[in-house]
Image (cartoon, rainbow, N blue to C red):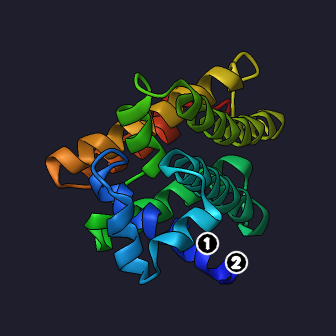
C-alpha cells in the first residue's frame, strides 16, 4: 500500500461527502469507489471520525491555499485581487453548478451540534480563511481602498459568513445569482472605499 491510497481515500471522501454528508456516507462506499479492501482503510485511519478530521484538514488547507495563491499571483489592488478570486469561483460555479458547494460549510451545518471536536476543526479553517481576507482588507486600507475607520476583522468575518450562506442559498435557488449579488454588494457598498 502506498501513500497514494490514503490520498485517494481522502479525495474520494471529499467528493462523496460534499454531496451526501458525513453521516450518510459509509466507509464501504468509499472503499468500493477507491477499489481497496477494508483492511486498507484501517491501515490509514483508526475510524470514520479519523477520516473526517483528515478530509477537514485537506479541504481546509486547499481552500486557504487557493485564496493565498491567487492573491500572490493576481495583478492589481488588494481589493481587486480579493474580488477577482471570488468572481472566479462565481464563474466556475456558473459553468458547473454541481460544484456550488463548500465541504466545510456542509459539514459544519451537519456536525456542529453532534461532534464538538470536528466543529472546532472546521471552525479553525474558517478562521484561517477569514484571517487571509482580513489581511487583504488591512492592505486595502493602507492603499486607501477601504476607510481607515473600517474594522477589517469584522468585515472579513461577515463577508466569509455571507459567502457561505449564499452558497446554501444558491443551491436552494439552483442559481449563482446570490453569489453575484453578494460580490456586487460587498465590493460596491459594504467595503467603505475612501476613493
* Residue 151 seen from this side: yes
* Residue 61 on image: x %, y %: 67, 55
Q: Nearer the viewer, residue 56 or 183?
A: 56
Q: Quadrant of residue 153?
A: top right
Seen at 45% across and 71% down, the residue is 12
Image quarter where the C terminus lies is: top right
* Residue 22 on image: x %, y %: 37, 47
Q: Residue furthest top?
A: 149
Q: Which residue is mark 2?
A: 3
Q: Nearer the viewer, residue 8 or 61?
A: 8
- Side of 153 relative to 48 (left or right): right
Seen at 65% across and 36% down, the residue is 130
Q: Which residue is mark 1?
A: 6
**Residue density around tag 1, few if under 14, some if 14–19, many if 20 or more, within 10 Å:** some
* Residue 181 seen from this side: no
Q: Quadrant of residue 152?
A: top right
Marks 2 and 1: in contact by CB < 8 Å?
yes
Q: Secondary structure at mark 1?
A: helix
* Residue 148 on image: x %, y %: 76, 21
Q: Residue furthest right?
A: 142
Amino acid at each position: 500500500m502506498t501513500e497514494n491510497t490514503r490520498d485517494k481515500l481522502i479525495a474520494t471522501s471529499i467528493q462523496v461527502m460534499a454531496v451526501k454528508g458525513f453521516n450518510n456516507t459509509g466507509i464501504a462506499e468509499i472503499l468500493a469507489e477507491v477499489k481497496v479492501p477494508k483492511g486498507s482503510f484501517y491501515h490509514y485511519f483508526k475510524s470514520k471520525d479519523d477520516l473526517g478530521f483528515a478530509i477537514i484538514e485537506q479541504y481546509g488547507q486547499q481552500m486557504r491555499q487557493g485564496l493565498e495563491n491567487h492573491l500572490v499571483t493576481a495583478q492589481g489592488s488588494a481589493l481587486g485581487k480579493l474580488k477577482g478570486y471570488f468572481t472566479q469561483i462565481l464563474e466556475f460555479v456558473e459553468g458547473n453548478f454541481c460544484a456550488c458547494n463548500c465541504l466545510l460549510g456542509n459539514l459544519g451545518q451537519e456536525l456542529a451540534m453532534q461532534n464538538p471536536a470536528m466543529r472546532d476543526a472546521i471552525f479553525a479553517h474558517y478562521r484561517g480563511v477569514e484571517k487571509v481576507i482580513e489581511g487583504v482588507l488591512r492592505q486595502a486600507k493602507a492603499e486607501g481602498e477601504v476607510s481607515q475607520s473600517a474594522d477589517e476583522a469584522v468585515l472579513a468575518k461577515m463577508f466569509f459568513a455571507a459567502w457561505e450562506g449564499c452558497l446554501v442559498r444558491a443551491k436552494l435557488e439552483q442559481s449563482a445569482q446570490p453569489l453575484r449579488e453578494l460580490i456586487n454588494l460587498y465590493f460596491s457598498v459594504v467595503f467603505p472605499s475612501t476613493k
